[in-house]
Image (spheres, coloured by chain):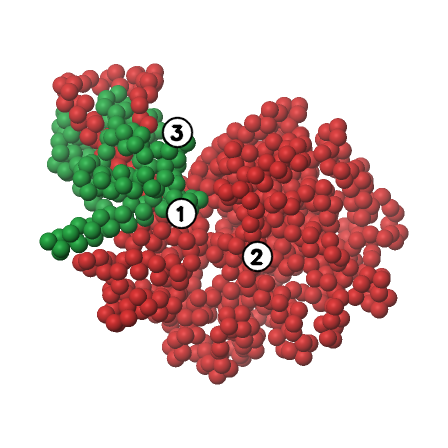
Amino acid sequence: MADSTQSAEAIVSDVHKKIRAAFEAFDYESNHTVDVREIGTIIYSLGCFPTQANLHDLIAEVEEDHTGYIHLDKFLPAMTKVLLDLKFPSIPEDLLLQAFEVLDKEKKGYLEPEELTKYMTQEGEVFTQEEMDEMLTALADPEKNLVYYKDLISQLTIDPDM
Amino acid sequence: MGCGMGKTQLQLKKCDRVSISVPAATAIRAALLIQRWYRQYAARLEMRRRCTWKIFQSIEYAGEQDQIKLYTFFGFLMDHFTPASSERNLISHIFRKNEFCHDTEWERYFCYKSIEVTDSYTGPHLTFPMTFCGVSKLVEAFKHKQQLHAQYVLQLLGETWRLLRIFPNISQISAYHNKQITICGDLHGQLEDLLLIFYKNGLPSSEKPYVFNGDFVDRGKNSLEILLILFGFLLVYPNDVHLNRGNHEDHIVNLRYGFTKEVLGKYRVHGKKILKLLQKIFSWLPLATVIDNKVLIVHGGISDKTDLDAIARVDRHKYGSALTPPKPTKHAVNGSKTQTINNREACGPVEGRRRVCSLTYCSSGPAHRHDLPRRSLHNAHVSSQFNWSLEKELKKRRRMAGFDQSYGELRKSDSDSDPESGETTETDVGEWKQIVDVLWSDPMAQNGCIPNEVRGGGCYWGPDVTEEVLGRHNLQLLIRSHECKQDGYEFCHNRRVLTIFSASNYYEVGSNRGAYIRMGPDLVPHFIQYQASRTCRELTLRQSVGWTERSALRALREQLFVHKSDLISAFQEFDPNNKGMISLRHWASATERVLNLGLPWRLLRPQHVSSTQCGMVDYQQWIRELSITEPKQEISDNSILETMYKNHSNLETIFRIIDTDHSELRFLNFYNKSLITFEEFRQTWKLLSSHLQTEISDKAIADLAQSIDFNKDGVIDINEFMEAFRLVDISAHT
């Protein structure tokens, strides 16, 4: 019994360290606060895949009364729970592939920028123009200006464990 | 955050030809999934980019701090050494305290007429006075990678020197009459960025005034070309082109950061002369620009002590390098307290040095009085904010420059001899601090004003200081540069402080955009951003982040390698049982303690170290893997090797000081290489070892010297020596 408790504690301690490390990268004044606009990046970087709605809810929980800042004291417990509960699990590669194939109705193996733009900016939790431009810069093959999603998925979903 | 932006007309047109035949619900689910995935991916990229940025920045600032420490040390030595000491000569070189020169002698020294432009020269030919066609020709020539002949360089610089001497410390300009003013930040020798700005914005002219806010040189490889272009435009449009001094317009900083090397490399025979003239020009660059008494533009920033009246009053040219504060005159023998001004009789040549700044240079024609630029008196608004009258100052300067008097008449005025004129007073240190603050300071988020220990000079100032200083002078905006920003510009302090940075891809290809400001009569800044390198546009976002990151990690690995021994000692403190393994937390804490760079080591860990199960680090192996290529020479004493590597920047700086002194001997040097003697090498090491408080025996130095190729009569080739450790600048590869 004692062993499993200890390992549970160790797990929590490890999670805390991860959260602190990510938080510190944006804690510019070294006073355990970050700008609320950065919190999405922090949460994502901890390996989570929340929707925008999820993010909104989490932020509402931890923001300091509309100051525009989030303090580590509130963020740490909330985020720990998120990580321990695996609340926003990652997206399996095959599911992602299916999603792209749904949009690629002609089964070409790639998406044209206009196609992708239409979906990303009109459906679901739509992208801003800026996000869309950035996505195309990031994902489109520079020469052919097409999004070869199959290659991308395998290249991009692997990332070193934080 | 991503809540529905309306469709644009453009989007509709493009998308109309794509018809959706997928069931709506499925499409929505698919889109949601992809959006979620992409946002996560973009955020992780952003995190990596932030860490990379922090690495570059902290290494950059640590380097500046390092240099200032070195110079402070030399200053300390100067105060406390007895004349018998042989090291004194070396340090004297560094501070050039023994150089007295009359202005006529300077004019003769800088005379370009004896330099012949032979027929084999294929570069541009300039005529003076400078014209718009002349500068345009110069820009074109530099675009085609031509080099300007030394004769023209010296002539252009000479004209610039004379012109700058009549400018006030603070330029007053106006955006009335619908003039748009263009303001550029740091350029750091990156000619492509300047050319890009001219391409997008047009060349400077009376209709298109420009302010260049310092740091034109160092790091990039075309610092000299940038200076020549900027000075060229200054000569043609002295009322419409304004240059502020930056902390890199400083001959001592240039020794370390590449400008000195660039000039000596491009002009092997006349390089030293050019550098000396530039040293004077830098000290004569104005310190600030003010637009319509409302917008203040300085390179670094302000401090709580900043007083524009005081700055307007200083003799700015006395402060050749911001790194060496003015020192009171010494008695030669026993280093006792300074003599006061009243005891001038004892000091001999002082009277003789008070000469008029004559214009007795080697040109044929008489001074063209009617061509003289009429600055500021037209532009200055009704009442200047400052108590010091601009008019008075201008009159004084013109008198000093010899415009208002007949040739040969002696007046009591400052000469342009070297800074240590032997008449420094107590106010000098206060003045010096005003200048250093304005050139070196950085803003911070917290209130207050604290010394800028990261850079080693100037201060960190907070939003309360901004409010106070701006309020005191009735200003509304402070524009400054000095810090690289990812988007080329950034506001802070409630949008009262604006940083503008014009060197794109500063740390690495893809690291950041550059930007410039356009400002009209409403004094609202508008930004234009750009990124110079052709290759970077072709990279995807991921590749660009990856490239920059790899470069930063390389730089960081070098830092880690350099501190190998210290790291091992620090790790061993956490490993009392000598297991060779420590926890990640201890690894991070030890590494930060040794390197002191303030980096988020836990986040960087995956890039540097692979952890075993249970999250432990095999630190011995890690250190082994850090080793870069073994140096070519076999050197027995490993600690010297490490010390040398750790201090290679300092070493190189000192070598270059010595080298600069030699360059007039260069025509004797068949191989045209940068050489120092064994004795100079030994002296350098002795100095450095006392700075670092380590013991290095004469025998160890002799062994070291032996192992380096000394087949040239006891001289060392500096570049070969540095190359032995693969200490090649990243900039050499771009």
What amino acid is found at the position of numbered circle 1 in the picture?
Trp
Front residue of B36/B521: it is B36
Q: Earlier in the sequence, mark 1 or mark 2?
A: 1
In this view, the residue farthest toward the bottom is B699
| Mark 1 surroundings: few (<14), some (14-19) or many (≥20) residues within 10 A | many
Q: Residue at x 61, y 42 (%)?
A: B298
Which element type, helix, strand or loop, lies under badge 1? helix
Mark 2 vs mark 3: same chain? no
Q: Which mark is residue B53?
A: 1
What amino acid is found at the position of numbered circle 3 in the picture?
His
Q: Please state which of the two labelled residues, at mark 2 or mark 3, is closer to the viewer.
A: 3
Chain B color in figure: red
What amino acid is found at the position of numbered circle 2 in the picture?
Val
Left or right placement of residue B603 versus residue B97 in this view: left
Where's residue B255, x and y in %?
56, 60
Residue to which mark 3 is pinned: A66
